[in-house]
Amino acid sequence: MELEEILLERSTLKRKRVIANELDNDFTNTPERLAELYGQYAKLRAELLEQQRQLSGLEITKWHETTTQLHPASEVLKDLREDKTIKAPLLTQAWLKFYEILWNVPELIADSPNVGKGGFNSLHLCEAPGAFISALLQYWASEYRRYNYFPDWRAATLNPHHEESDPGAVIRVDTLILEFPHRWVFGTDNTGNIFNFGSLANLKGKQFSLVTGDGGVDCSADPEFQEENSAELKTSEYKAICYKLKNKGNAVLKLFCCCHESSLKILESAASSFQIVELVKPASSKAGNSELYLIMRGYFGRMAPLENSAGFLEANLDVIRFFINRQRKAIADNLEFEKCNKDWNIDMSQFVLSNKQILSNKMNLANLKGTSANSGLTLRVAVGYTTHAGIRKNADILSDFFPFHQRNNTPTFEKKN
Ligand SMILES: C[S@@+](CC[C@H](N)C(=O)[O-])C[C@H]1O[C@@H](n2cnc3c(N)ncnc32)[C@H](O)[C@@H]1O
């Protein structure tokens, strides 16, 4: 892998207005043409699946070790955690990803209306345990020290303390929820489920400068259908983003793969509802997984319909192909490494170290030292979770945080009998 390839990849989506006028649309938007184009996206997905199937037969723990070993963010994270001068809570992969996004797309904050006048606030959907919040406040402490305030943040997520919460879906780590209960909303039924009517009712009348949606569902049993199985969640998050965003506000939404109709409709609606829309793959997100972040800037104040036109699908096929090919190459590289590693003792330390350095520099992580005391997120208790019996336990940062999310980070596959 070339060094430049580990840096965040950005691709701007073409807007409907730019790619086709209404007259063209009338002629090309036939159901047959749309079906044909959806077929082309499905073909990209099938090619990716073919590559992923080559992983079947590998031992999953070993594969996880290999991909982690080659992933520059693992080393960066290790350094950050060992550095005791950095006190940001929840230093997880999610923290790093969002910090990287903020660092690479500074307009997400800088272009917000009234940011210098105390007017910046944020809402984080599907957010437990809250690493995006920690990353945002840390970034703010580092870049916006000159302003005399911190973002007024709110968050929504599945309620880990609700008796009906599904242990497989909910993130148990609740420190940020316990420390800042007035900042979390769980809706009228107290479940926090974004599918339920009234899930954001407590925020009535409040609009936000920045809204994020990082939802994920456990797809480990059905990894091939991660995108389809997340479709309802992603659509709900996208609608909630549009519902709660200020005019001219900015947003970030995690998506998977972007070959399925449900994602393509979100992409096209976003391209018509925002001034600038980009898909990005942070370098700190493992190159072999399907997650992509949709960055939306300059909200027009109304959500365009969730539908596709032939013009949009044609114009953006190459963008999606770029990300799929990149993912396929990452899997192929990892497989090649795994194969060679069986016969040769390969020392990758120099490679990993130089990539780690590039990533750290790119995110200006050295600048973090000493700023964390001002992030406004100093916790009184160790990061942990509450058991059903009401007993408080500390969480092991690596194993307890993302019981299913970490599994999703690596391609999952069947072990050969
Ligand atoms: C990947 S984690 C989010 C990580 C978070 N951004 C962070 O930085 O710590 C995905 C979250 O989505 C939540 N989630 C999944 N389905 C949900 C739903 N239907 N309603 C609300 N939250 C949901 C999960 O409980 C989990 O907290």
Image (spheres, grey):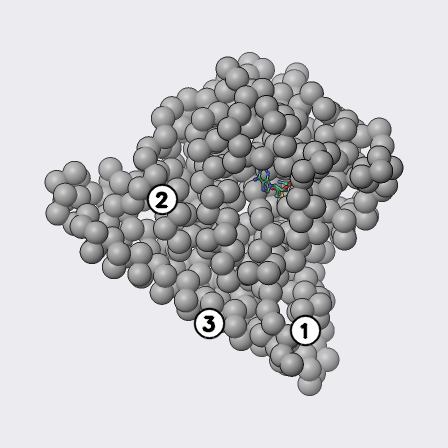
In the picture, which quadrant includes the C terminus? bottom right
Q: Amino acid at mark 3?
A: Glu
> Relative to 267, is 93 on the left or the right?
right
Image-quadrant location for residue 302: top left
x, y (%) of residue 279? 44, 46
Label 1: few (<14), some (14–19) or many (≥20) C-alpha neighbours in 10 Å: some
Q: Give the CA separation, mark 3 to mark 1.
A: 18 Å
Residue located at (31% from left, 42% from top): 307
Q: Are marks 3 and 2 in contact (CB under 8 Å)?
A: no
Answer with mark 3 or mark 1, whichever residue precedes in sequence: 3
Identify the element where label 1 is drawn: loop
User: Camera-side residue: 255 or 192?
Assistant: 192
Q: Quadrant of the N terminus?
A: bottom right
Q: Is mark 3 within 8 Å of ligand 1?
A: no
Instruction: Name the element at disc 2.
Output: helix
**Mark 1, residue position:** 59
Q: Which residue is mark 2?
A: 265
Say whether disc 3 or disc 2 marks the residue closer to the N-terminus: 3
**Residue shown at 44%/57% (left/top)?**
323
Residue 329 location, x and y as percent? Answer: 49, 68
> What distance separates the C-alpha of mark 1 from that of mark 2?
36 Å
Amino acid tagged 1: Glu
| Disc 3: which residue | 50
